[in-house]
Image (cartoon, helix red, strand yellow):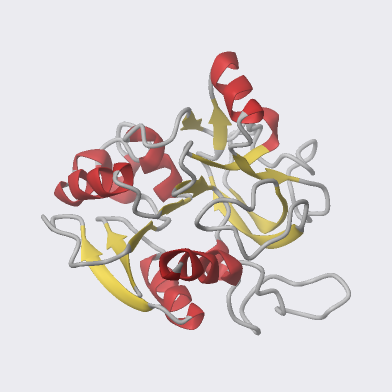
C-alpha cells in the first residue's frame, strides 16, 4: 500500500512520517509540494513543520502549492488524507476541514507528551483504537488553538466528527493549561470530515511509533510509547478493505 508524504519548504517532520508509514508496513512515497501528480499513492500525509515559514498564517501559502490541487481532488473522491500539526492547519486552509488554527491561548510554543482521548474510531485513520481509549503522543506547536463558530462546533459534536480531545495527565504545560494545552474550543485536538477519510490533529502520532523514541508511558518506563502507530496501521487496514 503506497502512502505519500508531502514535503513543503519549511516542513520538519516528513522523514518521521515516512518512517512511521514503513514501520506500519506501508510503502512510503515522497511527494514534493511542486508535484502535479500523486504518483499512484492510495493515501496522503501532510506532515508537521512551518511550511513557507508560516508567513501570512500557518498553512495559508501551502494551500496554493500545485500538489494540493491533486490532494484536494483526491480527498473529495474518498482518498484517506491525514494532516498532522501544520498539515492540520493546511487542511483547514483548503477547507477540507472546517474551522481554523490560531496562536496558542498562552501565546507561547508548547512541547510535551500529551494524553488524548479517542472520540471516533470510525475514520480511516482510527479503526485500530477503541472508543474512549486514552493515548499519549508528543505535542509541539505555537498555532495550535482550534477555533470555529458555534454552529460548526455544534455540528462537529452532533455528527461525532471530533476524533481526539485533550485530557488530563500531561506534564510540563503552561500554568492553567494542564488539560487543554492551547485553548482549543471544546478541548479539540483532532477532527474529521463527514466522510471520515480526512483527519487532522495537532499532536504528532509519527513521533510515537517506535519503542525507545516515543513518549514516556506512565508505569511502563522511559520512551516506551508507540500509541501513534495505530493511525498508520488503521489506514493500511482501511485501504485493504
Quarter residue 108 falls in: top right
Q: Position of residue 189 (x, y in %)?
A: 62, 43
The number of numbered badges drawn on the structure is: 0
Which residue is drawn at the image coordinates 38% and 41% (left, top)? 91
**Depicted 88 relative to depicted 130: above or below:** above
- Indicate left or right for 7 with 239 as reference: left
Quadrant containing the N terminus in the rendered view? bottom left
Residue at 54% over, 21% down: 152
Pick whichever, 21 or 223, lies toward us. Answer: 21
Residue nearest the viewer, comparing 98 with 19: 98
Task: Give the quadrant of residue 224.
Answer: bottom right
User: x, y (%) of residue 135?
Assistant: 72, 61
Q: Where is 125 relative to 178, above or below?
A: below
Q: Residue at x 26, y 66 (%)?
A: 41
Asked whether 97 or 93 is in front, the reply is: 97
- Residue located 60% across and 31% down the image: 159
Pinpoint residue 215: horizontal percent, then vertical percent.
69, 70
Q: Quadrant of residue 39?
A: bottom left
- Left-right relation of 184 to 131: left
**Outermost residue, left side:** 36
Amino acid at each position: 500500500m503506497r502512502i505519500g508524504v508531502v514535503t513543503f519548504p519549511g516542513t520538519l517532520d516528513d522523514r518521521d512520517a515516512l518512517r512511521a508509514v514503513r514501520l506500519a508496513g506501508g510503502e512510503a512515497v515522497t511527494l514534493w509540494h511542486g508535484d502535479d501528480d500523486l504518483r499512484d499513492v492510495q493515501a496522503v500525509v501532510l506532515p508537521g513543520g512551518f511550511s513557507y515559514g508560516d508567513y501570512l498564517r500557518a498553512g495559508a501559502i501551502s494551500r496554493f502549492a500545485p500538489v494540493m490541487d491533486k490532494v484536494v481532488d483526491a480527498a473529495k473522491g474518498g482518498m484517506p488524507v491525514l494532516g498532522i500539526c501544520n498539515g492540520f492547519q493546511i487542511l483547514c486552509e483548503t477547507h477540507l476541514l472546517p474551522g481554523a488554527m490560531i496562536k496558542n491561548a498562552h501565546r507561547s510554543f508548547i512541547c510535551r507528551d500529551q494524553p488524548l482521548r479517542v472520540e471516533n474510531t470510525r475514520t480511516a485513520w482510527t479503526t485500530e483504537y477503541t472508543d474512549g481509549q486514552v493515548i499519549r503522543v508528543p505535542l509541539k506547536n505555537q498555532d495550535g488553538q482550534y477555533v470555529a463558530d458555534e454552529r460548526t462546533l455544534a455540528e462537529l459534536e452532533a455528527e461525532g466528527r471530533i476524533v481526539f480531545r485533550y485530557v488530563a495527565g500531561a506534564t510540563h504545560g503552561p500554568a492553567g493549561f494542564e488539560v487543554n494545552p492551547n485553548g482549543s474550543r471544546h478541548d479539540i485536538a483532532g477532527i474529521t470530515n463527514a466522510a471520515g477519510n480526512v483527519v487532522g490533529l495537532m499532536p504528532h502520532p509519527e513521533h510515537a511509533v517506535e519503542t525507545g523514541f516515543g513518549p514516556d508511558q506512565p508505569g511502563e518506563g522511559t520512551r516506551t510509547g508507540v500509541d501513534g502507530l495505530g493511525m498508520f496501521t488503521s489506514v493500511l487496514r482501511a485501504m485493504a478493505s
